[in-house]
Image (cartoon, rainbow, N blue to C red):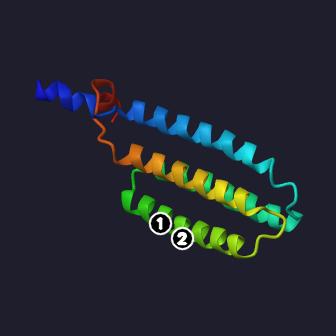
Amino acid sequence: MLGRMKGLWTQTPREKAATVDGINLFFGALLGANLGTLDGLGLYDYGKVIFILAGTVMALRIFSTTERRAYAYGLLGGYVLLVALFLYLLKRDPVGISPADIDRLIVTLTIWLGSVLLVEIYPTMATGKDQEQA
């Protein structure tokens, strides 16, 4: 009975990859919708926002696919600090972007990061097919 219960709380590597892909797809679309509200932003500042968001997508994707855990956590930690600093500076001097839009961006990135972290720390079990491929 305990073995069956443990199976409910684990995921296969393919399930994990599918979950992360679904999270990334959803939040990518959500970011696209949020970018539609940044029309008051100048071209230079818009470029900075796009750069930070593209980096977020890449950092989360690398984090969820690499086998090098120390590298993954270091990359993600450094990137979270960079994004937090960027958003803090944006919030201090919002030119062309409303504070509500910055808040929505912060909430979106925070929930996205938390979702990916939750999937990553969730236990993964190897299936027969996965063991054959290894």
| Closest to the observer, 62 or 19 | 19
Q: Quadrant of residue 119?
A: top left
| Closest to the observer, 130 or 101 | 101
- Outermost residue on the front side: it is 100
| Residue 126 at x, y percent in the picture | 28, 33
Which mark is on residue 27? none
Image side of residue 11 versus residue 85, left or right: left
Q: Would you place residue 63 above or below residue 28 in this image?
A: below
Q: CA distance from mark 2 to mark 1?
A: 6 Å
**Picture residue at 33% right of the left edge, 36% below the top:** 134
Q: Which amino acid is tagged 2?
A: Leu
**Picture residue at 48% right of the left edge, 32% below the top:** 18
Q: Which amino acid is tagged 1?
A: Gly
| Closest to the observer, 97 or 25 | 97
Report the residue marked by disc 1: 77
| Residue 59 at x, y percent in the picture | 56, 56
| Residue 44 at x, y percent in the picture | 85, 67
Q: Quadrant of residue 6?
A: top left
Q: Would you place residue 1 above or below residue 61 in this image?
A: above
Q: Would you place residue 23 above or below residue 68 in this image?
A: above
Q: Dots 2 and 1: beta carbons under 8 Å? A: yes
Q: Residues within 10 Å of mark 2 (few under 14, many from 20)?
A: few
Report the residue marked by disc 2: 81
**Picture residue at 76% right of the left edge, 65% below the top:** 48
Please state, as top left, top right, bottom left or bottom right, where the N terminus lies in the image. Answer: top left
Looking at the rendered structure, the secondary structure element under dot 2 is helix
Image side of residue 84 versus residue 133, left or right: right
- Outermost residue on the left side: it is 1
Q: Residues within 10 Å of mark 1 (few under 14, many from 20)?
A: few
Q: Is residue 58 visible?
A: no
